[in-house]
């Protein structure tokens, strides 16, 4: 290969490590709305402190230039770590003890690891993270300019989850603590009757009363081990515990009990909510379960559940009573800002990406620790390669596998990071490296990048929507911000290919027996359906002996058969899966029909974007077509039929019409309709008994993307020495495509017997005369005069005898 990327190759992951060091040395400037080198941040700190710095950061302390300059290096590095795009911090993670590593949210299903099915718990760990949340608005807005499906865009919009609202401050009674909540519905503030903290909230230990500490801690311990996905999904499950503390209502001053409940997530908003049970379904269920008061503040019926409408009026709400919801929100937000107890905020569901994995396989972080703080290696020290270890398991004291490596430290003796990067690290910029894979100086040369720019077409599944496709867009935008690449987005156009579904076969067992009833008779018995291996079913007929041998429990099976003496299976269209025994082995099909037949049939199944049910019986039609194509070149004895004669206008018309159609279909990814065009073409050439090189040679070229192996054989048969892969795709000639004539189907008493070609402008009487006086017509007329000759111009001729 002239260009190739392997993400596990140190020559490749050198550039993944390089990108990480750039993220470590960068911060996100809200003023310029882009990433910038940390050196510009340090310059601001040294001149004016951080009061006027607008950065994406959780750091809240304000310091002056003098205070910054007076800090020790360690203190400065600790502050900078709060601003860096790649940062190290204590984070709630999905920890899988059995695998000994942190897992991303999309690697956890129903509380267990997707791979292996091991228990996953939530715990706080010091982890590397990437500040992808800084790019949330750009990731959202820039979707509009992409040629992606609406479904894919909507998935990403929901994942990014933009919401506009207000942050409101609630003072905790008898303390100096303040709880901030984010809400999109500040108009419902007077309906708040309790507050809820997420189980992961750091506020819990600061507000819980001593008499409630034990029960709250027990609840928190249980709740944090459940994944956010599960907590969101289980809407009917109501759990929670009272903290013993109260907050003060910002307007009424009334006591509001503070609860802890797992339906509130730490990752959304502030990890705390003001609960308005009259107008939120989960708040309503919680209030009913724990007998908490419900105050209605929006007009509507709440007798059977929460009611919400932005078209209704506000009630029981002091100075906003009587206003419509949108107007009430605006007035409430203004009052909150006026009183200094709230402010406008745009919130996003998108969280920073946890970037550490406690396993061996992955790019080592180019990070060492000095006085407990992280620093990155210089570029000339990259790549930092994976070291030799005796086992790919955590150490006895619980360190990641890299802790087993001898001398895992810098030449100065500083310890290196023991975690590795996740899978998405290597896959986030492979397309950039592919542009310039042999360059050992830069990720991609600027001139090369200007030529290639970004990916014109990406074909991939919807399952990457909230993983790889988000990460790659973020990674690309970061490199774009720093001027390393010329495009803001990585993938310009995307097509999501449909899934090929399996056609499952079903057998029907009479309950509490080992007797199986044929599908047509199941209404007469009490049966249960079972999936059966599709490889022992042919055209819905079960091979009964093979079934008995398939599984031991069926060795003594008996069958109730149809009148034809066979067992007919039922069927369903489902996802191809081992559990449904409907997986078709492509090797078996290739052995039986040839790889090219399988390839063409897959493309013939239906439109690229749609899910398509697999039916092995349907492959027979494509197999017959391949044999028909072959017969244009070779006779039944294997002797060549190709001749060097000049083609007729009709034969040229068939060829050039097909070239035009196939070219258009390929360019719009309509592969199934291109296959139909090939079939029509071969049928028409067969009717012409066309074996002419001038027709078959271009036909072989245009069909080669679909039948590459057969096309190579035919190309050699046409006396070519080089591979067909280097042949030029032919152009069509408009002159041959113009329809000046038409092949009329000639029917006798409604039954088509043969075809005749006539000019499209030929008078009807002349067509009638030419038909009835032709030699072909005489054997059907049998010397008789036709009673009537019906001509539909450009369609059909029917002779009534």
Image (spheres, rainbow, N blue to C red):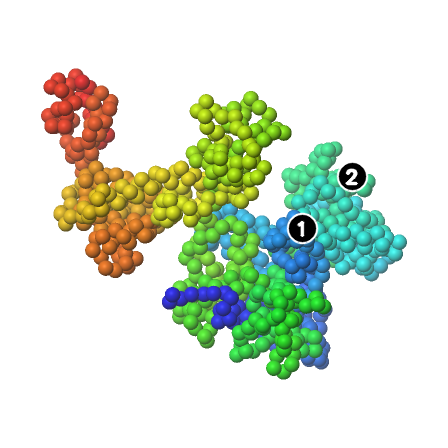
x, y (%) of residue 574?
51, 39
Q: Is residue 671 left or right of residue 123?
A: left
Q: Nearer the viewer, mark 1 or mark 2?
A: 1
Q: Residue at x 74, y 56 (%)?
A: 200
Residue 288 disc label: 2
Residue 111 disc label: 1
Q: Which residue extends farthest front?
A: 556
Which element is circle 2 on? helix
Q: Quadrant of the N terminus?
A: bottom left
- Examine the rendering and report whether any part of residue 241 can be seen: yes
User: Does residue 746 sit above or below 220 in this rendering?
Assistant: above
Q: Which is more toward the observer, 119 or 761?
A: 119
Q: CA distance from mark 1 to mark 2?
A: 28 Å
Q: Is residue 278 left or right of residue 310?
A: right
Q: Residue at x 75, y 43 (%)?
A: 238
x, y (%) of residue 446?
43, 70
First of labels 1, 2 by sequence position: 1
């Amino acid at each position: 290969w002239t260009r190739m990327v392997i993400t596990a190759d140190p020559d490749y992951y050198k550039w993944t490590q390089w990108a990480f060091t750039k993220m470590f040395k960068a911060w996100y400037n809200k003023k310029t709305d882009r990433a910038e080198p940390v050196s510009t941040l340090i310059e601001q700190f040294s001149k004016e402190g951080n009061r006027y710095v607008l950065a994406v950061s959780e750091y809240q302390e304000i310091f002056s230039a003098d205070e910054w300059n007076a800090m020790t290096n360690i203190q400065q590095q600790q502050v900078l770590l709060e601003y860096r795009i790649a940062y190290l911090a204590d984070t709630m993670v999905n920890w899988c003890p059995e695998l000994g590593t942190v897992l991303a949210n999309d690697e956890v299903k129903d509380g267990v690891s997707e791979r292996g099915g091991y228990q996953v718990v939530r715990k706080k760990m010091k982890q590397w993270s990437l500040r992808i949340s800084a790019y949330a608005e750009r990731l959202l807005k820039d979707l509009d300019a992409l040629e992606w499906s609406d479904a894919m865009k909507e998935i990403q919009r929901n994942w990014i989850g933009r919401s506009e609202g207000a942050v409101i401050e609630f003072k905790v009674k008898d303390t100096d603590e303040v709880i901030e909540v984010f809400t999109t519905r500040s108009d419902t503030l007077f309906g708040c009757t309790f507050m809820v903290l997420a189980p992961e909230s750091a506020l819990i230990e600061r507000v819980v009363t001593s008499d409630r500490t034990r029960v709250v801690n027990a609840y928190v311990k249980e709740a944090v081990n459940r994944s956010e996905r599960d907590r969101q999904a289980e809407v009917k499950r109501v759990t929670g515990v009272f903290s013993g503390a109260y907050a003060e209502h910002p307007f009424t001053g009334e006591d509001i009990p503070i609860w802890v409940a797992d339906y509130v997530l730490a990752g959304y908003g502030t990890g705390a909510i003001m609960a308005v049970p009259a107008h939120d379904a989960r708040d309503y269920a919680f209030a009913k379960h724990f007998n908490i008061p419900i105050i209605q503040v929006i007009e509507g019926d709440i007798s059977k559940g929460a009611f919400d409408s932005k078209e209704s009026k506000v009630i029981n709400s002091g100075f906003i009573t009587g206003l419509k919801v949108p107007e009430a929100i605006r007035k409430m937000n203004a009052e909150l800002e006026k009183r200094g107890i709230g402010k406008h905020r745009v919130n996003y569901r998108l969280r920073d990406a946890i970037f550490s994995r406690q396993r061996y396989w992955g790019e080592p972080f180019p990070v060492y620790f000095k006085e407990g703080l992280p620093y990155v290696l210089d570029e000339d020290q990259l790549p930092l390669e994976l070291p030799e270890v005796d086992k790919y398991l955590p150490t006895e004291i619980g360190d990641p596998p890299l802790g087993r490596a001898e001398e895992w430290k810098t030449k100065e003796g500083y310890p290196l990071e023991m975690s590795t990067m996740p899978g998405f690290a290597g896959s986030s910029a492979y397309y950039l490296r592919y542009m310039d894979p042999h360059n050992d100086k830069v990720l991609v040369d600027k001139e090369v990048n200007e030529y290639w720019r970004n990916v014109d077409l990406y074909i991939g599944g919807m399952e990457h929507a909230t993983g790889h496709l988000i990460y790659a867009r973020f990674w690309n935008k970061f490199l774009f911000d720093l001027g390393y690449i010329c495009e803001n987005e990585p993938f310009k156009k995307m097509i999501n290919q449909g899934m090929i579904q399996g056609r499952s076969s079903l057998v029907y067992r009479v309950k509490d027996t080992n007797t199986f009833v044929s599908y047509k008779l199941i209404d007469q018995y009490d049966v249960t359906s079972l999936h059966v291996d599709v490889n022992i079913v042919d055209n819905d007929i079960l091979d009964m002996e093979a079934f008995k041998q398939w599984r031991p429990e069926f060795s003594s099976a008996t069958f109730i058969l149809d009148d034809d003496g066979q067992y007919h299976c039922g069927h369903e269209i489902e996802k191809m899966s081992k559990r449904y025994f409907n997986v078709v082995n492509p090797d078996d099909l290739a052995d039986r029909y040839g790889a090219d037949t399988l390839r063409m049939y897959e493309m013939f199944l239906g439109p690229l974007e749609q899910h398509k049910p697999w039916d092995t019986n349907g492959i027979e039609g494509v197999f017959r077509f391949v044999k028909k194509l072959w017969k244009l070149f070779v006779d039944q004895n294997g002797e060549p039929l190709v001749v060097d004669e000049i083609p007729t206008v009709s034969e040229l018309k068939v060829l050039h019409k097909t070239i035009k159609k196939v070219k258009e279909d390929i360019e719009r990814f309509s592969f199934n309709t291109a296959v139909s065009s090939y079939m029509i073409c071969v049928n028409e050439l067969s009717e012409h008994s066309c074996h002419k090189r001038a027709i078959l040679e271009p036909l072989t070229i245009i069909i080669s993307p679909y039948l590459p192996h057969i096309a190579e054989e035919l190309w050699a048969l046409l006396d070519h020495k080089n591979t067909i892969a280097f042949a030029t795709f032919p152009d069509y000639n408009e002159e041959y495509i113009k329809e000046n004539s038409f092949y009329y189907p000639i029917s006798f008493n409604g039954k088509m017997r043969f075809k005749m070609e006539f000019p499209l402008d030929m008078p009807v009487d002349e067509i009638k005369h030419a038909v009835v006086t032709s030699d072909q017509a005489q054997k059907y007329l049998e010397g008789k005069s036709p009673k009537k000759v019906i001509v539909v111009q450009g369609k059909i001729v029917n002779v009534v005898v």
